[in-house]
Amino acid sequence: MAMAARTVAVLGASGGVGSAVVKKALANGFKVRALARSKSKAMAALGDEAFGQLDAFIEGDVSDASALAALLKDGGDEHPVVMSCLGTPKGMAPCVESGTRFLMDAMALRGWKRLVMISSIGVGDSLEQGRGMAPIFIRCIVPCFLSKVFGDLERAEELCWTERGGVKCVAVRPPALTDKPGRGNFTLASASDPRPSKTAKIPREDVAAAMVQLADPTAFGQWAGKGVTVVVP
Ligand SMILES: NC(=O)c1ccc[n+]([C@@H]2O[C@H](COP(=O)([O-])OP(=O)(O)OC[C@H]3O[C@@H](n4cnc5c(N)ncnc54)[C@H](OP(=O)(O)O)[C@@H]3O)[C@@H](O)[C@H]2O)c1
């Protein structure tokens, strides 16, 4: 069902989760503004139809203040939301903490007060839950191969909880992502939920649907200042 038109600004629109967020938000009637480092990569990820429906596309890096200013233009929307789908590309220096810092400062400057960011199961107070849902990943893979990426996510979340510049955040923490079609059968759980899914995989489309669901002011208010684990049965 289409919601009343509101504005979302998506970072990482050329990525797996980011492009799925753009498509889901458009399908739900949102006005969508998108930023990515490469226009051609974003067009390939979104397809001509979704790309053509964007309210604005800005080519730029998250560290580029003028690109962020263009993304966060005042559209007269009372409840605009930023969806940060930033991730560190393989072999690159972690970018999520620094990107979140740039982003929150730009949001504060332009009066955007709500941020939904992609994080991961196992980050912050979801560590124990992550050990239950994905024991080998959290106990072995993360410390051996992904400690820098997870350290970066930890610091990005901590930054979020400071409400820098009055910006409130929700961190969305999925288990392993897949490119299977979304089924819409996900639930949002807190880190202390006693019934986390044992299926530690979720389609990117379902994570995108969860993030777009959090654009609703009531849903956002319920989770603001917290991490949300997205689980499938
Ligand atoms: N993979 C998993 O199983 C898993 C599980 C749990 C959580 N997560 C989290 O989910 C995140 C998103 O996953 P994904 O599959 O969507 O990753 P992805 O496809 O690699 O997307 C990451 C996005 O971030 C953008 N980006 C990186 N650095 C940037 C910068 N400096 N300025 C602007 N944009 C920048 C990338 O742009 P370019 O296209 O230009 O590189 C890309 O659009 C992961 O990075 C991770 O933190 C992943």
Image (spheres, rainbow, N blue to C red):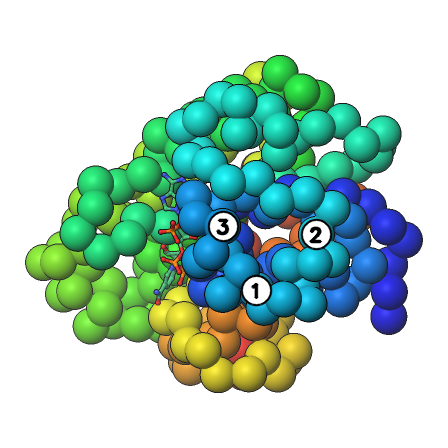
Circle 3: residue type? Lys
Image side of residue 115 versus residue 136, left or right: right
Visible residue check, residue 58: yes
Query: Which residue is disc 2 drawn over?
Result: 54
The residue sitting at 86% across, 65% down in the picture is 2
Query: Which residue is disc 1 drawn over?
Result: 46
Asked which quadrant contains residue 165, the reply is: top right
Give above or below for 137 relative to 18: below
Alpha carbon of mark 1 to alpha carbon of mark 3: how far?
A: 10 Å
* Of residues 63 and 3, the one drawn nearer to the viewer in this rendering: 63
Badge 1: residue crowd in 10 Å (few <14, some 14–19, many ≥20): many
Q: Earlier in the sequence, mark 2 or mark 3?
A: 3
Check disc 1 and report its element: helix, strand or loop: helix
* Of residues 55 and 4, the one drawn nearer to the viewer in this rendering: 55
Check disc 3 and report its element: helix, strand or loop: helix
Badge number at residue 39:
3
Q: Are the two marked residues, 1 and 3, in contact with CB atoms closer than 8 angstroms? A: no
Visible residue check, residue 158: no
Give above or below for 67 relative to 172: above
Alpha carbon of mark 2 to alpha carbon of mark 3: how far?
A: 13 Å
Q: For ligand 1, which image quadrant applies?
A: bottom left
Alpha carbon of mark 1 to alpha carbon of mark 2: how far?
A: 10 Å
Q: Are the two marked residues, 1 and 2, in contact with CB atoms closer than 8 angstroms? A: yes
Give above or below for 201 relative to 151: below
Image side of residue 36 versus residue 81, left or right: left
For this orientation, the residue located farthest to the right is 4
Circle 2: residue type? Leu
The residue sitting at 50% across, 70% down in the picture is 204
The residue sitting at 68% across, 43% down in the picture is 56
Foreground mark, 1 or 3? 3
How many labels, in total? 3
